Amino acid sequence: MAAVEQRPYEASREKGGSGWAIVLAQELRDLWLGGRGLLLSFGFSILLSLIAYLVATNTALNFLEQRESVNLTLQVAIAVGGLLTLLAAADTVSGERERGTLETLLLTPVSRRQVVTGKLLAALSLWLVAFAITVPYVWFLGRGLLIVTEALGTGLVVGTLLAVFLASLGVVISLFAGSNRVSLSVSLFLLLALFAPTQLPSSAQQGWAGELFLRANPITAGEHYVGRIVVNSHSWSEDVSWLLSPLVAAVVFAVAVPVLGARFLRLGGGRAK
Amino acid sequence: MKNIGASARHVFIDRSRFATRVRAIRGRRGRSGKAEIAVSPAVEAQGVAKRYGSLVAVENLTFAVEAGEVLGVLGPNGAGKTTAIRVLTTIFSPSRGSFAVAGVPHTRPAEIRRRIGVLPESDGYPERQTGEEYLRYHARLYGQTRASARTIAGALLEEVGLHDRRRSPIAAYSRGMRQRLGIARTLVNEPDVVFLDEPTLGLDPAGQRQILGNVRRIARERGATVLLSSHLLAEVEENCSRVMILNHGRVIAEGTVAEVAHRAAARRSGRLHVAPDDVGRAIAALTGTRGVETVEGADGQPGWLTVVFAPDAEDVENRSPSDALRVLLDSGVALLSFELEGARLSDAFLAMTAAV
């Protein structure tokens, strides 16, 4: 086997930028200029408008206080923003696999770790846009209150942690899913399962077992934390232990994406090596 | 190639450099014309196998391709062509064996990917991107700067005849245009070795001709080694300097078209047209002639004879038909026409893949 000769374009490669950044830029272009991100964001803003309208004009009917209106809107924004992020992430690898574009990406010298990292970051952009859309609604509903800044800050922190967790979860599912339909279905099922505890009667959420259950679930723990800050006017540090599971989930899954991506980003959904 | 500025030539299109590269890979030759140093193959595989559980997709793949060669990879459906290409292009890891591409061992897949261009069989394209955006993106993935990626994209679109449609979304491209775009994509990194998996699949004859023209140019002008997997045997015969036939995951023949056809010992036959009065004399003369297996008159076609030549592994120079013709002429038979069939790649292919 011959010695490897120097490639003539190595010099320009040095200036070409990181692989993940190039993948991220292209994914952002596809997501936003391709129209999919705009469409999802438009749907998100319609939903948020509807909720804001209902909580702002119908307080007599639903007995919501102004703080609770802000809390509800923020929690819906976090939940739906997370859903959009999860859906975008669940399409990243399995979608490319189905469209037949994954093989050409795998044939480039960009490492698989960098490919999935770029795709993960692009999916997270949906949450950032969703949050930006939420800001004026929260500001409008919370006008006259002193909690708007805290509400927005808490929403950004909790929402970002949950978005990182859900987007990473979506990418991991997408890595192993045999088809895009499977990837989206499993992701949605897991999201519903994570949200299910929020619908349990309050009696089921009492006691040490109930609290442990709420704390262990990143979604319920995060939303609980937001409620404590916005509705109960607690300081950010008072209930910070509730952020433990969202933080752990975000870190663990965010680390898992490049680690698993390096090994399992394959043509056959984790089957063919 | 047209409209390429000096900077473009500097960054990307430098034919002399390609030629230099080929010479470097081929090795120096002395005045005698014999190689003075060992020639390094562009692709070299030693006992490569790929298995999925008990299913053997590729078994003991051993071959070498010299720099600048065009190797036709043939085989029936399911023979393992695509799997072999996916192993050699580092998409799949081999279950056993080793290989090197452009001198890079398979243990360094990222380095191999920098040196190859691949057009996969089931190539998909982002429908919303334009051809130019698509090539720019891939050039960037190979580490090019924005400016050089733009230059490369423009030059390659010109080369494959898509410059006028560079700003059209790929969704509006025909199948042939997509394949040409795919070929352009395989060249964004100035590959040493180009793998083309069924590039003419689903194309009309004009599209096939365009693609094969591109393939010839890749080998001739760029000095790249080409591995061309195709079902179009005539085109492979015409465009490839060597062929390799796979069946059931194994290499069953490798060499030049003539060598493979000879090794296949495919039966050849000839259609003779003689004066109707000479039919009996011709049959008598040919019967018993060395190399002639059977000879008989064609039903309903006065004056036409069908001669089947025996497969003879020793008959390297295809002498049997000439000998038969000589016997006829010596016998005073008036020969009106003679058509030799067989001994083509398609005959060898059918003979080999049917036999295994």
Image (spheres, coloured by chain):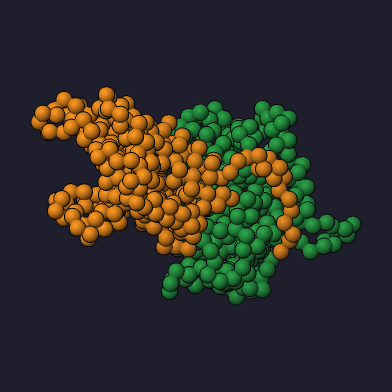
- The residue lying furthest to the left in this view is A61
Q: Residue at x 25, y 54 (%)?
A: A214
Q: Residue at x 62, y 43 (%)?
A: B143
- The residue lying furthest to the right in this view is B31
Left or right, A266 with reference to B268: left
Left or right, A13 with reference to B308: right
Residue B271: image location, x then y, percent: 54, 60
Tell me which chain appears green. B
| In this view, B348 is above or below B214 | below
Q: Quadrant of residue A69?
A: top left
| In this view, B167 is above or below B51 | above
Left or right, A213 with reference to B159: left
Q: Quadrant of residue B45?
A: bottom right
Asked whether residue B211 is in view, the answer is no
Residue B8: image location, x then y, percent: 69, 33
Where is the N terminus of chain A found, in terms of image quarters? bottom right
Q: Residue at x 78, y 47 (%)?
A: B20
Tell me which chain appears orange. A
Callout count: 0
Q: Could you say which is closer to the camera, residue B348 or residue A7?
A: A7
Residue B228: image location, x then y, percent: 57, 53
Residue B328: image location, x then y, percent: 64, 65
Asked whether residue B356 is in view, the answer is yes
Q: Could you say which is closer to the camera, residue B320 or residue B14?
A: B14
Q: Residue at x 56, y 49 (%)?
A: A110
| In this view, B40 is above or below A61 | below
